[in-house]
Amino acid sequence: MNSRDRVLAALNLEQPDRIPFADDIPRSVRELLMGNKDFTDIEFARKIGMDALDLQPHPYYAPNFCQKKVVDGHEYMIGGLIKEEKDLKLVKLPDPKDESFYDPVKIFVDCHGKEDFATFVYMSWGVEGVLNSMGIEAFSFALFDKPRLIESLLEIYIEWNCIVMEKLNTVGIDFISTYNNMAYNTGPMFSPQTFREIFLPKMKEVANTCKLPWVFHGDGNLMPLMDDLVSLGMNGLHPIEPKAMDLKKMKDTYGDKICLWGNVDMNTLSLGTPEEVEAEVQACIEAAGKGGGYILGSSNCITDYCKPENVWAMAKAIRKYGVYNA
């Protein structure tokens, strides 16, 4: 079984020969892990044992419209720009009908599609764009004062994503991962009722347009929304943060409906020891690996503050403990 077969089997809730390994690892972090810049993405994936490759730097992730600042080389969003109806003119998304917009993914598929790896693209289907472009405070007030503003902004994102998704269906990638961060560790940023009334119907439009397997990415505690999220028809959920959601509970409750992808703790990867990382990989496999339908990775993405020796320890432990017995 090759890497592509392995990932697609897990997304289809089947048991592959071993647990797949996939993660979001930016090129700059790959260079830190490799200790040099002279390697291809294929060479990196083979060395670390990843089963999936994503297109970087994520050209089909819908932009956010907010103020930003850079601290120590890291960019932070500090305030949404969309406060009034008149601000909607600031929302300028790439032309989704421009064929050249899809050149990056076509090149990516040409270079990587013939390899054994599963290929995927990151998107953002609207929730994150609205929250980041308005800011949580302005969004919260608008729920009562200006609901039409939220609906108008969301509609812009949804229409754009539907057009992009129709094209991505045809270019030869294997699956989609869509960022929809909308929860704190304590729970969602808004009520389940708000999600059902505002976001869920519009997100279904994009989900229905998607003809590929797809994964919902959402940080924090999504438990109050899980039944609604599953109704979207997603194939998987990522990253199942350890401090917010329990991987074993998720496997027991939703493991027959969705593939689980995660959830080695970022704190362990950045502050722990290789031995602690290995133990956590074992615990994740014990909690979610049985019967398949599980992809192992970090509880968010691999960043430059993760200790390289810990990332390599995670990769080694997956190979050591992730084999299914015949």
Image (cartoon, grey):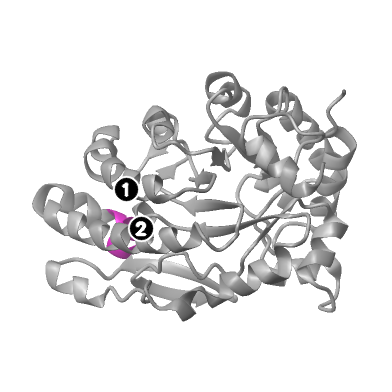
**50 or 135: nearer the viewer:** 50
- The total of numbered circles placed on residues is 2
> Where is the C terminus found, in terms of image quarters?
top right
Q: Dot 1 corresponds to which residue?
A: 205
Q: Quadrant of residue 233?
A: top left
Considering every residue shown, the one lying at the far left of the view is 145
Chief secondary structure of the magenta portion: helix
Q: Position of residue 35 (x, y in %)?
A: 86, 71
Amino acid carrying label 1: it is: Glu
Q: Secondary structure at mark 1?
A: helix
135 in magenta:
yes
Q: Is residue 174 above or below residue 81?
A: above
What residue is rendered at 28% in x and 47% in y? 202
User: Distance between the Cα atoms at labels 2 and 1?
Assistant: 7 Å
**At which x and y percent is residue 105?**
57, 69
In this view, the residue in front, 109 or 161, is 109
- Residue 264 visible: no
Q: Are marks 2 and 1 in contact (CB under 8 Å)?
A: yes
How far from the left and from the top, in percent, is residue 76? 47, 68
- Please indicate whether residue 318 sits to the left or right of residue 219 in the image: right
Residue at (43%, 43%) from the top-left corner?
Answer: 184
Q: Which residue is mark 2?
A: 162
**Magenta residues?**
129-136
Three-letter amino acid code at the position of disc 2 = Cys
Q: Going from the N terminus, do you reach mark 2 or mark 1 first?
A: 2
The quarter of the image holding the N terminus is top right
Kindly tell me whether residue 245 is visible in this rendering: yes
Q: Percent x, y for residue 41?
A: 76, 68
Q: Residues within 10 Å of mark 1 (few under 14, many from 20)?
A: some
Residue 100, magenta (yes or no): no
